[in-house]
Amino acid sequence: MVQDFLELGLSTQILNAVAELGFEKPTPVQGTVIPKLLAEDGDIVCLAQTGTGKTAAFGLPALEYLDLKNPQTQVLVLCPTRELCRQISQDLENYSKYLEGIRIVSVYGGANISGQMKDLKRGAHIIVATPGRLLDLLKREAADISAITTLILDEADEMLNMGFKDELDAILAQAPEQRRSLLFSATLPKEVEDIARSYMKNPEVVTVGQRNAGSENVEHYYYMVKEDDRYAALKRIADYNPDIYAIVFCKTREQTQKIADALQKDGYDADALHGDLSQAQRDHVMERFKRRALHMLVATDVAARGIDVNDLTHVINYNLPQEIELYTHRSGRTGRADKKGVSVAIINQRERGKIRKIESVIKKQFTRLPVPGAREICERQLAHLIDGINSVEVREDIYSFMPMINELWDGISREELVKKILSYEFNRFFDYYRKAKDLNIAEKEKKGRGRMSDDNESGVTSGDNAGTKERKANDGDPGVCEKGYIWLRLNMGYRNRVIPRDIISIMKACGIGKKAVGKIEIFNEFLYVALKKDVAEYAKSQLNGATYDRRRLTASLLRQG
Ligand code: ADP
Ligand code: MG
């Protein structure tokens, strides 16, 4: 793998353009693929995740091979979506900034075809296309791919997922036999292999990196709420993160639109991106998101595929995807370029198994976070507002108004003024959160599981749907404990982020071994731990008045029946 752009064998014009883009050294995909493409002439299947720099990996060598004096189309790039078409052609334009007279045309569905026909008529050294639209243009003889030397299939797995198989077959059948084919894909399902087998010549398979460079920096969290509280939880997450810049992934187009509408109605800068929108609408949404006029882009996987937005603060899984692959794609959108990324999932009680499945595939642990409560959110928002006020630049323009301002605020104390200003901005939050309930669902010990064991790493048990009861406001009924045991109730709970493992250590600290500890039930404000009857009284006396995590504990025993 080549580590320096200067050693790749690219021409000066291209190197200059790349330098201007701020690319300092080739990404692993680029360092591996570019030298191969320049020095050899075989076909290549390249497997690499999103965000690994594939566009330049195929784009830079493709530009090197162009004969700009020949007006025929020499390179065809096929990709699954309109956004991707536009992005790839924009990237190619950037790389070829110093190549005089180059013409790159992108064609995709959902836009006026006659404009695209005119563009093509003026010549296109490179066509970047979605399969459906290209086929249409080929039928109208508006595009000609009979002279292409390089064919590039980008995001091949997604093109097949989207049902472009027939179109691909038809296009590939028209492409000249004498050509080089390159296929880029995040995954290699059978369908992609079939394409490679039928249309490529002994392709060399290059796999670069297990994951995209960024995903090492991604932290994974989940919030567990009742199904009906999903949307409320999303709002809490947004409110708790005043600088949020996130993609919110939903299952369906309908849901995407519904959530985006609701967010807008509730005063958030959010909008939807999905396949039912017209091209103009999608462009408008993307343009606003990229310039950060939108803070949340609510999108389907397909619509967001390949979209390159940097510096996302969060990827939010409003729903977990059906396929684990997709989760990797989603979370790979954050944590780019050595920045810390955050991927969160909102789940209901029945979805913890999905989290565990994902954990085993991505080889990373999720951490459960409590859904922020009213107090925490209001604190964060106020601090943010005050921060903003502190860092604002005071311009001279205000000076001439000061006499008037002083007069209007005559006689008001500093404290009064601060309260008024902050309340002016803040009352809507107070209003909303005054009535806000706690959305967290208590962790539950699996029924009949008996003792907690120390080897339960996260303290999270698998009994998420076993015996789940409705939680009462703050507290709950722990049910019946094991025979010979008695419930000890402690005044801390999920709110204080205790997990069963903590309780075992607390008990140990007051001299009660694991063997004397039975079932554990954690609610938001309280928890119950079943203790052997002969030690329960002693435990109570040890715990009462003790402090844990700066909290004064009160312990009581629950006599049963
Ligand atoms: P992929 O197609 O693999 O998903 P892209 O080609 O869209 O990835 O690149 C992802 C991002 O990384 C883009 O913003 C691109 O400008 C940037 N990028 C690509 N190559 C480099 C490089 N060598 N150095 C820095 N940034 C790069
Ligand atoms: Mg790409």
Image (cartoon, helix red, strand yellow):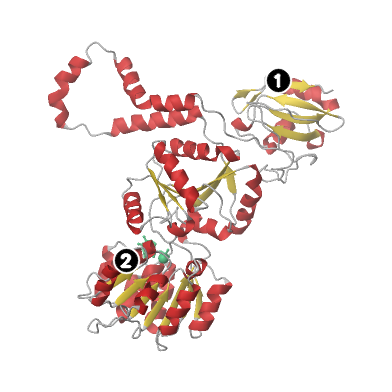
Q: Mark 1 points at which residue?
A: 544
User: Residue 171, position in %: x, y?
Assistant: 42, 79
Residue extending furthest toward the bottom: 178
Measured from the top left, where is residue 445 in percent x and y? 73, 38
Image quadrant assignment for residue 392: top left
Q: Residues within 10 Å of mark 1 (few under 14, many from 20)?
A: some
Mark 1 and mark 2 lie on one chain; the one further toward the N terminus is: 2
- Quarter of the figure that contains the N terminus: bottom left
Label 1 to label 2: alpha-carbon separation = 66 Å
Q: Where residue 207 sits: x, y (%)?
A: 51, 72
Q: Position of residue 63 (x, y in %)?
A: 31, 76
Q: Are marks 1 and 2 in contact (CB under 8 Å)?
A: no
Along the horizontal axis of the image, is 395 left or right of 7?
left
Q: Which of 399 and 145 is in front in this view?
A: 145
Q: Name the residue under label 2.
A: 91
The residue drawn where x is 29% and y is 16% is 414
Which residue is nearer to you in this view: 15 or 308? 308
Position of residue 452 in the picture relative to residue 400 (left or right):
right
Mark 1 lies on a secondary structure that is loop
